[in-house]
Image: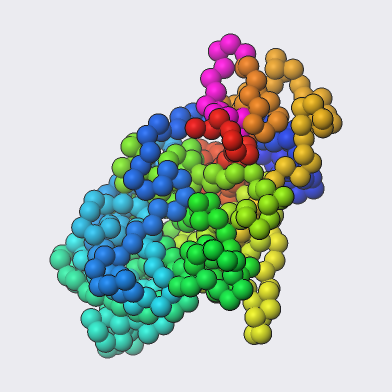
Amino acid sequence: MMRGNAVMHGKTRTRSLRRPALLVALTLVWATMATFTPAATAETPPRVGIACTTGVGGGATSPIFNLTTKTGYISLPDGNTAFMWGYSSGFGAFQHPGPVLCVNAGDTVTVILHNTLPEAASIVFPGQANVLANGTPAQPQPTGAGAITSLTNTAAAGGGTITYSFLAANPGTFLYESGTNPEKQVRMGLFGALIVRPSAVPTGGAAGSTAGEYAYNRADSRFNPSEEFMVLLSEIDPYQHQAVEGGKAFNMNNYHPRYWLINGRGFPDSIADNGASWLPSQPYGALAQVGEFDRAAATADQPGMARYLNVGTEDYPFHPHGNNGLVVGRDGRPLEGTGGEDLSFEKFAINIGPGQTWDVIFKWYDAEGYDPVTNPVPVTVPQMANQEIGVFYSGSPYLGTKETLPPGIQSVNQCGEYYIISHNHALFQITSWGTNMTGPITYMRIDPPTPNNCG
Ligand SMILES: [Cu+2]
């Protein structure tokens, strides 16, 4: 499988992935790795896409979030589990990663941290200026001997509380994470995403549009809010987690990640719905489900949007197959010149470094307009008997078309939709302690134009 993967990657760099024939190959090969069955019931959060947690109290522009540190376990693709620390939403059960905090630019955000851990803990908000802790400027905590114990003020062990507040001045995608022993606490799971949306439609924005349709205060950062996705990348060294669970010291010189996750899940759990019942502490799926972009309706149809975050210690060369993306922002700042010039750029692989965030707008459209009658695929599609058929394959290379599959073949394809893999391109990072083709892998699912039978 590793060899096949490498071969396929050679092709992805030199050939258009909009070609259904290649899609067939991708779907067939990759989909055979999964045995996932989509959940049948809708969840309160959106079934796919970003599941925001919004603040309560404090008024419309002063959201308040309560976060509580908790311990718990997550499921990993090789059948293992990992002991974790996490920020829970409110006073709720342990979850990994922490809740996705969604606010608007101009909001005064209050985050109250309740710490149940056996050591002091904290939160830093990279990208936010003038953070207050209990009403005074947050600052590193000195030992008095020339060292610091924390990058910011802490909540004491075993029940301490601290209140952070800041003005969310700029739209963008940000991390929040522990500033206390981060080499331990962040690795253990004390992190999450903070999304700041524009407070108003940007100058030059489309009539009838809303502020939430824009990534930044730029009219050219518009996207379809129903096609907004999070790609939060992280890593786990199970020996570190075992040591913490047992109350033992861990020598960071021995740190060696063995698991890599996307939104706190490995593949194939990564493509399960938000709130999937068998992942009670891993609420966030990573399936990017989009419709075919309608190029004929450019003023009405908007692209999708993926917010990438790297909370690990290594570069993650993540890349969605299928198309280039347009990088419109990094680290919570729009890519623009001092005069507001558009400095966005197209990119295939999203080479995201530790601590970075990237905002990427993307489209998928059937560039060749393949049609079984008027414009058939110009290669011979192998007979069914010569195909290795994955569980996501529709039986046809044509979007929106389903064909009868051979007896005994189980298919979860609903309506002739396509699935394109999106994954970390560092192949050692898409493993789970040696179990290959797991880790930070997900799919982009492309639904045929409406009306369709996707249900
Ligand atoms: Cu790839």
Is residue 67 highlighted in magenta? no
Residue 83 image position (x, y, % from top left): 31, 49
Q: Main secondary structure of the magenta part?
A: loop
Residue sitting at x 68%, y 73% = 343
Does residue 343 appear left or right of residue 214 in this picture?
right
Residue sitting at the far left: 159
Q: Identify the image's colour scheme: rainbow, by chain, secondary structure or one colour.
A: rainbow
* Nearer the observer, 145 or 283: 283
Asked whether the viewer can see residue 101, the reply is: yes
Vertical order, 452 against 104 (above or below): above
Examine the image and state in which quarter residue 302 appears: bottom right
Vertical order, 384 against 363 (above or below): above
Vertical order, 220 against 85 (above or below): below
* Nearer the observer, 105 or 451: 451
What is the span of residues highlighted in magenta in the rendered image?
Answer: 406-417
Residue sitting at the far front: 207
Residue sitting at x 54%, y 46% = 288
Asked whether the viewer can see residue 441, the reply is: no
Residue sitting at the far right: 378
Is residue 408 highlighted in magenta? yes
* Nearer the observer, 76 or 197: 197
- Quadrant (top left, top right, bottom left, bottom right) of the N terminus: top right
Residue sitting at the far top: 407
Examine the image and state in which quarter residue 206 appears: bottom right
Residue sitting at x 68%, y 26% = 396
Residue 78 image position (x, y, % from top left): 43, 37
